[in-house]
Amino acid sequence: MDGHKTARYRKISGYHGFRYQFFCDLSGALMCTTDFQKEDDPLQAWATKGRKLFSRCQKCGRWVSDPMYNAETLECVRCSPWEEQPAFCPQCGESVLEDRAFCHRCHARLKYRDKEECG
Ligand SMILES: [Zn+2]
Ligand SMILES: [Zn+2]
């Protein structure tokens, strides 16, 4: 599970040290920007600031934000889609305002209640 110790992040180095931005693995949304720290240590930044903003999918290991996490199954919404209308598109993160089966932005399927059984 290399590469899954933290959510996807971007490092910013400056005069005062390093800071990190953490992103939701699924929607790509920026979740936080840490304060400067002296060491180039993303795991430290993750432990002090990033970790608590994310939930980890028990199935695929992605670190995702709350809207991308299905707390009932402890999996991300890609592995375990909502049966009810989601508030956000699991594909692109766009807000879902109307009762639609598909995202108006990326056309991802939003409701899985009617999906065919596979296998
Ligand atoms: Zn997952
Ligand atoms: Zn979408």
Image (tube, grey):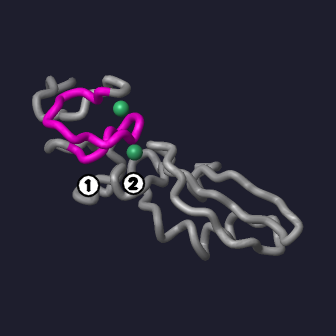
**Residue under circle 2?**
58
For image coordinates 10% across by 29% down, the residue present is 114
Badges 1 and 2: C-beta atoms under 8 Å apart?
A: yes
Of the 4 image quadrants, the one containing the C terminus is top left
- The stretch in magenta equals 86-104
**Residue 104 x/y as whole percent:** 29, 27
For mark 2, give the secondary structure. Answer: loop
Q: Look at label 2 and name its amino acid.
A: Gln
Magenta span main SS: loop
Instruction: Please rate how many residues cluster around mark 2, counting C-alpha atoms within 10 Å: few if below 14, some from 14 to 19, many from 20.
Output: few
For image coordinates 64% across by 57% down, the residue present is 21
The verdict on residue 60 being magenta is no
Disc 1 Cβ-to-ligand 1 distance below 8 Å: no
Q: Look at label 1 and name its amino acid.
A: Thr
**Residue under circle 1?**
73
Which quadrant holds residue 46?
Answer: bottom right
